[in-house]
Amino acid sequence: MSRIWVSRVLWTVALIVMILACLRQYRKQLTDQLLIGARIGDVVLIRQALTSGADPNSRDSAGMSALRLAVRSHRAEAVATILGAGADTRASHISVQDLGGVGLDVDVGGTVDCAIDVIRAAPELLDSLGTRALSNAVQSDDRIAVERLLSVGVDVNAVERRELMRNAPLMIAANQGNVPMVKLLLKHGANANQRDSVGLTAHDYAKAKRLFYDEGVRHKEDGAYIASRQWPAQYVASLSARRNELDQIIKLLTEHDADGAKNR
């Protein structure tokens, strides 16, 4: 009897160990599915994993949380799904670098949606994430994204802490000669007197860019000069139009800059 009892105990223990191993493997598969889905922004994979019991706070081997991976994928629906499952925004350590910069491979609309979703879940991230998203939206001339960010409380005059030149959104728009964007930012209270790290205002940026175009307009009939500067023909043809846009910006900024109106 004792041998039968011992064998049954051993068999039961072995069965429990096997079941636990299977459960661990199953959970690992769910975690891997969630992390893969988050990394590529695949909402179907994410939902399947979460519905099956995956932990929304799961991390990969590098310590990157599913929520942070989803933010990096720039897929707002993926971010919202993981947040809705109870992901901890504080423990995820989301940073401005996760939103990325402006480039051909960056979906600005996606980064804005992600930033807004995370900000709503974690208001303490408003300044950091909101500022980077606003800067990206201004540089990409996405006025709808700018409006959305300002509507959730992002400061129109905010400057990224690690931004060397301390360029505010209005300075970026003025330097680009973007008249509609400048109007939009001024409408929302952008400070035309704000200065960057070397003391320049948005007006100074617009004026400097206008001088650059003035040089091109003065020499646009000089083929040798243009060739020496390696300016494309279509660029040269647009110099006058760009200068006119900058004239509009300078006028707009002067109207909003009492000091500038007196000194210039």
Image: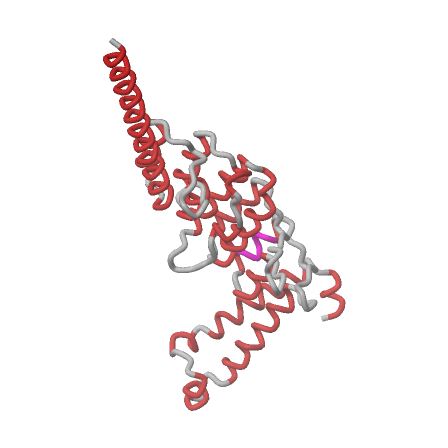
- Say if the magenta span includes residue 182: yes
Q: Residue 212 at x, y = what percent?
A: 55, 77
Q: Residue 146 at x, y = what percent?
A: 52, 49
User: Is residue 7 found left or right of 222 in the rendered image?
Assistant: left
Q: Nearer the viewer, residue 162 or 138?
A: 162
Q: Residue 23 at x, y = what percent?
A: 32, 28
Residue located 47% across and 30% down the image:
86
**Residue 206 in which image quadrant:** bottom right
The residue lying furthest to the top in this view is: 1
User: Is residue 127 found left or right of 41 in the rendered image?
Assistant: right
User: Is residue 196 found left or right of 244 in the rendered image?
Assistant: right
Total label count?
A: 0
**Residue 1 in which image quadrant:** top left
Q: Residue 249 at x, y = what percent?
A: 59, 63
Residue located 51% across and 34% down the image:
88
Model colouring: secondary structure
Image quarter of the C terminus: bottom right
Q: Nearer the viewer, residue 259 or 71?
A: 71
Magenta stretch: helix, strand or loop mostly = helix
Residue located 55% across and 47% down the image:
129
Q: Nearer the viewer, residue 143 or 220?
A: 143
- Say if the magenta span includes residue 212: no
Residue located 54% across and 39% down the image:
119
Q: Nearer the viewer, residue 107 or 214?
A: 107
**In the image, which residues are magenta?**
181-185
User: Is residue 235 found left or right of 260 in the rendered image?
Assistant: left
Q: Is residue 119 above or below residue 3?
A: below
Q: Is residue 211 above or below residue 46?
A: below
